[in-house]
Amino acid sequence: MAERRRALVDQLADALRRGPFHTALRTAIQTRGLSLARLRAHLGRMDVRVAESTLSYWQRGVRHPDPLHALGTVRALETVLGLPPDSLVVLVGPPQRGRGRKPNASFAELITAGPTTRDLLRELGVDPEQVNADLEVRMITERVTIGADRSQGRVETLNASVAHAEGIDRYVAVYHGEVGGDAEKVRVSAGDGCRLGRVRREAHVVVFELVFDRRLAKDETVVLGYTVEDDTGMPCPGYYRLFRAPSGPFLLQYQLPPENLPARMVQEVRSSDALPPSLSRELYCDRGGVVSAYYPGMEPGIAGIALEWE
């Protein structure tokens, strides 16, 4: 134990000297032995308000502190973590202007079903690395209906996006059912702002086009809705949405069967489906059987609500 402690202290000294910021922050948190929830609580006692998800993004390098607005929080982190003054601040660096949009994460980085998804996109003539690249998601709401048999029945999605190029005429959506599910039992229907185009299926993955009624102008906002109904009938362990690029707010709601409520519901964020959650928060449903998870903004990764039935 003492050897591990000495190793962490040495790693921390090296990280503070060399950077980058996220490595130094992550190492300092590990050395102090704090969970993100406890770290956030310590900051709160100093009247510093920061979301647990933001701390998670910072230590993973998914998001970088804004030098114009976050230096007070970074200095408070130095105090809580017992670090020398300005040791993290100098790693934040000066304000960066004119930074372009980050490239989208690949499906293979985020999900084990990545190769299947890429193959289906290619069948539609879509470059898997560029799909929807010129549509910036500003807001998404999803409502998932869970049946009395614990299966996921319907997913209703409303998506507001902004076009960053002229002439975009469709949005390509991907649905991943449960492993072992049957994509042939998945039905897709278009709602507001679009009509259903081509659909491709394999294993438990469905890829489909939502075609707009006209080509978009640059900087135009499009609002589209669609519904996915999965009749596979398997018990639902939770529903997750994949984000390949930074996104605006995401609201996820479950309509649960009042006569058969899960034993536990947990809001989660993962950097990929193969890694443990970077954010985990227990949720509770209201009297109508509705449970909600709100994400003020998303970086590339996976967000959803896990269900435990027993």
Image (cartoon, helix red, strand yellow):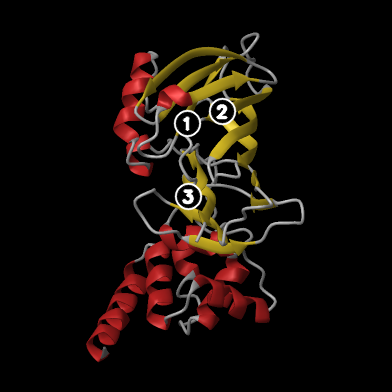
What distance separates the C-alpha of mark 2 from that of mark 3? Answer: 17 Å
Residue under label 3: 237
Question: Foreground residue, 4 or 122?
Answer: 122
Q: Position of residue 284 (x, y in %)?
A: 66, 61
- Crowd around label 3: few <14 · some 14–19 · many ≥20 (10 Å): some
Residue under label 2: 228
Q: Quadrant of residue 143?
A: top right
- Crowd around label 2: few <14 · some 14–19 · many ≥20 (10 Å): some
Q: Position of residue 151 (x, y in %)?
A: 53, 42
Query: What amino acid is labelled 2 in the image?
Result: Val
Residue under label 1: 175
The answer to whether the residue labelled 2 contacts the one labelled 1, judged by CB atoms less than 8 Å apart, is yes
Mark sitting earlier along the chain (2/1): 1
Mark sitting earlier along the chain (2/3): 2
Q: Position of residue 185 (x, y in %)?
A: 46, 25
Q: Is residue 233 visible?
A: yes
Q: Is residue 198 above or below residue 179?
A: above
What distance separates the C-alpha of mark 2 from that of mark 1? Answer: 8 Å
Query: What amino acid is labelled 3 in the image?
Result: Pro
Query: What amino acid is labelled 1 in the image?
Result: Tyr
